[in-house]
Amino acid sequence: RTLRTMTTAVHSPIVAARVGIRADGSRAARRAPRVQARVPASRSATFSSFASPRRGALAVVAAAPADAAADEGSLATSFFSPSKVNLFLRIIRRREDGYHDLASLFHVIDLGDDMKFAKSSSKTRDTLVCSDDTIPLDESNLVIKALDLFRRKTGIEQYFWVELEKKVPHGAGLGGGSGNAATAMWAANVLCGAPATEEQLLEWSGDIGSDISVFFSTGAAYCTGRGEIVEDVEPPLPLTTPMLLVKPNVGLSTPQIFKALDLNGLSSEDPLALMEAIKKRGCADDVCVNDLEAPAFSELPELLELKNRLKAAGEKEGKVTAVFMSGSGSTIVQVGDDAAPAFVNEDAALFKAKTRLITRKRGEWFAPSLEYK
């Protein structure tokens, strides 16, 4: 099967660095070899998005393999890497293997990262470049795990140059890292001539993460098991539905939230009934159930305060239909109005972003909405 993707060929703004391991002893430096690449004046316009806010016109770059070509990534292909929200999330039980069975209505959204991929001449490893210097660039990164998985499953010994411009916050319950991994698998498959079917990519993705699989749906999916069992469904809401994402400058780790989960305090709502209710009357507070809100709010009380303030502001304006937490947090989703209340706009520490639900056609990858651009 031939997989098509919405991509464009672009010139990479970053030239692979040969040497120069950081010696500042920081945690980021210890995670992976990195260098700081200064931007040539002639390239500053195209490079600006990779400039670190703490370093001005500098970007943190993984040292390229010694056997990589000098122009690695000079001609790369762009892919949009989306994120997701959970319109409801029910925890069904704790399994014998320590994981939890869930039932959730996932939907892909157009808040996403920008990624670029090119085949590498290296025979030893991938090179990952990232705009966020807090993100590890080694084998612990889901992008590298996804590329390793692709090679293992297909038997193709191809390494890649990858650029990742982060826009989705981590620790947010939005699956940004999972979206990066899914995009990496898709891109590798495209660049290698589509040796795998979409169904195979979906099946393989569950080996490295629970949320990755949803990105191989067509956008709206009812997910069960650990989240890796994906059933495509029709979008339950109009794709033009206004949504606002608000996140405090504190993240939550999924293991932390599941550790705090009280199995005796779970909702008794039937997941299929919740899905039908959303289809019939849209998002509302009584159907956008999230069993992980209670442990998240106990771990981060200010998150409950944020939700309550958004609800109160939404009720005053009369447009907001639901306010709920996505995934394991710490993002609160406002549905029905993408205008941020005054208190959100006044708080520079809060992450806020308008977003829309998006879908894709089989054989094509996701692209951002133009609804509110």
Image (tube, rainbow, N blue to C red):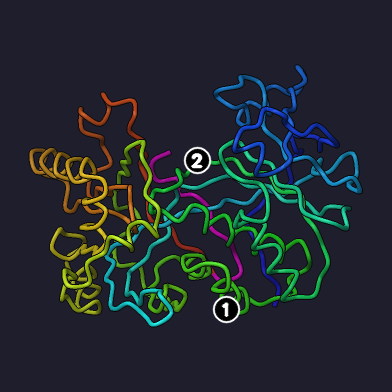
Compare residues 77 and 94 and report the one nearer the observer: 94
Image location of residue 196, percent across then percent down:
70, 76
Residue appearing at x 64%, y 40% in the figure: 130
Amino acid found under the numbered disc labelled 1? Glu
Classify residue 176 as left or right of residue 288: right
Write the start and end of the magenta stretch as one range.
362-373
Classify residue 174 as left or right of residue 142: left
Which residue is situated farthest in the bottom direction here? 96
First in residue order: circle 1 vs circle 2: 2
Q: Is residue 239 above or below residue 192?
A: above
Residue appearing at x 32%, y 38% in the figure: 248
Q: Is residue 32 above or below residue 142?
A: above
Residue appearing at x 32%, y 75% in the figure: 103
Classify residue 292 as left or right of residue 233: left
Q: Residues within 10 Å of mark 2 (few under 14, many from 20)?
A: some
Q: Residue 290 is drawn in which quadrant? A: bottom left
Which residue is situated farthest in the top direction here? 41
Label pair 1/2, CB-CB below 8 angstroms: no
Compare residues 324 and 362 and report the one nearer the observer: 324
The image quadrant where one finds the C terminus is top left
Compare residues 18 and 194 and report the one nearer the observer: 18
Q: How many labels, in total?
A: 2
**Where is mark 1, residue-wise?**
203
Rounded to the nearest angstrom, the CA distance separating label 1 from label 2 is: 27 Å
The image quadrant where one finds the N terminus is bottom right
Image location of residue 198, percent across then percent down:
61, 75
Q: Residue 143 is drawn in which quadrant? A: bottom right
**Where is mark 2, residue-wise?**
167
Characterize the magenta stretch by its predominant secondary structure. Answer: loop
Image location of residue 148, percent across then percent down:
71, 65
Which residue is situated farthest in the left direction here? 316
